[in-house]
Amino acid sequence: MELRVMKNFLKIAETENITQASRELNVAQPHLTRQIKALEDELGVTLFVREKKRIHITEAGKFLRQQSDHILKLVEKTQNQIREMESGIKGTLFLGAIETLGTSKIPEWIAAFKKEFSDVRYNIWTSNSRDVTERLEKGLVDIAIVREPFEKEKFNSIHLQDERWIVFINPEHIFSQKTSPKISLRELSGEELIVPTQRIKEIENWFKEKNYKANITCSFAPISNAAALVQQNLGIAIVPESTKLSVSDKDIVIKELEEERTSGVCVIWRKDVELPGVAKSFLKLLSAYANSKK
């Protein structure tokens, strides 16, 4: 499967119209039609269902569209990094990160890195740990900042910090009137809880350890949804501490957990990949940050 065929396929998949794709690609329509037919023969699947004036992409076509997009982005990233290898610490840092760190620590780290390497550009993807790790596995980012646990047999890592879990409470909830800055798992066990989707089992285990039951009525992703759900008085949210940077004290009451819980935050990178110089240099900065926390 040639790269130019992939590019042409993506345009056809985007428009679902051979005539329009032909015009935008500046490629003869019969040639595009033959390319798609040859691609279907090569893969042994039907990529498009043809009608009189339009075509519609099949499930197999949707999967190929997704994979082709990843492959072409990876090729472009590789080409750019190879060109930049001879020019010192320049180029683009492709960084994935969990959302909360994306809005708190990453700007601070980049500002420090920029003082030494002013020519570096940045491509930052923020999501939950699972999505960020998936992009790392596909080679779409060079390094990723995630929460533990992760597959240690696949990735090298540096432990950056431990982050506490806190609680978001609606100002109208009775618990918001408590003078204590902390709230216990026993108190929370009687409430409807809102928790990150990826952390349901972990949080349920906190309660089991104390012989309580977690009444989790809502899970969420991305993390920014937590505050909105609490503002609608749909429950009490348990979130990482850095989440509080995105909320106002007027809208949300924040309390600490009486039984303190933390999650480890690490930067990880694939063991089977040689990192570009810009990524290695950024890891040195993160390593220095981690050592300062010890």
Image (tube, rainbow, N blue to C red):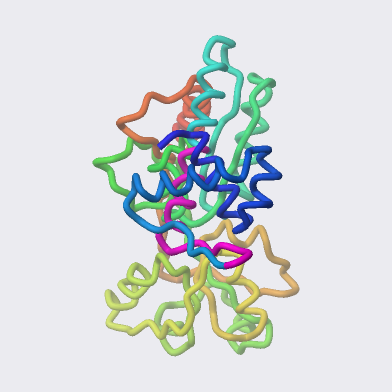
How far across and down, in percent of the image, does residue 81 sit? 53, 23
Residue at far left of view:
153
How far across and down, in percent of the image, does residue 58 sit? 45, 63
Side (left or right) of 275 relative to 24: left
Residue at far right of view:
250
**Residue located 49% across and 44% down the image:** 34
How far across and down, in percent of the image, does residue 138 sit? 41, 42
- Whether the magenta-drawn stretch holds residue 141 is answered as no
Side (left or right) of 84 relative to 260: right
Which residue is nearer to you in this view: 26 or 146? 26
Query: Which secondary structure is most common in the magenta stretch?
Result: helix
- Whether the magenta-drawn stretch holds residue 55 is answered as yes
**Residue located 55% across and 40% down the image:** 31
Range of the magenta residues?
A: 52-72
Which residue is nearer to you in this view: 36 or 195? 36
Picture mark count: 0
**Residue located 44% across and 77% down the image:** 184
In the image, residue 124 sits, relative to residue 232, either above or below, namely above
Task: Quadrant for residue 2, please give it.
Answer: top left
**Residue located 56% across and 24% down the image:** 80
Quadrant where the C terminus sits is: top left
How far across and down, in percent of the image, does residue 48 sit? 48, 60
Quadrant where the N terminus sits is: top left
In the image, residue 268 sits, relative to residue 172, either above or below, namely above
In the image, residue 211 sits, relative to residue 96, either above or below, namely below
Side (left or right) of 33 relative to 216: right
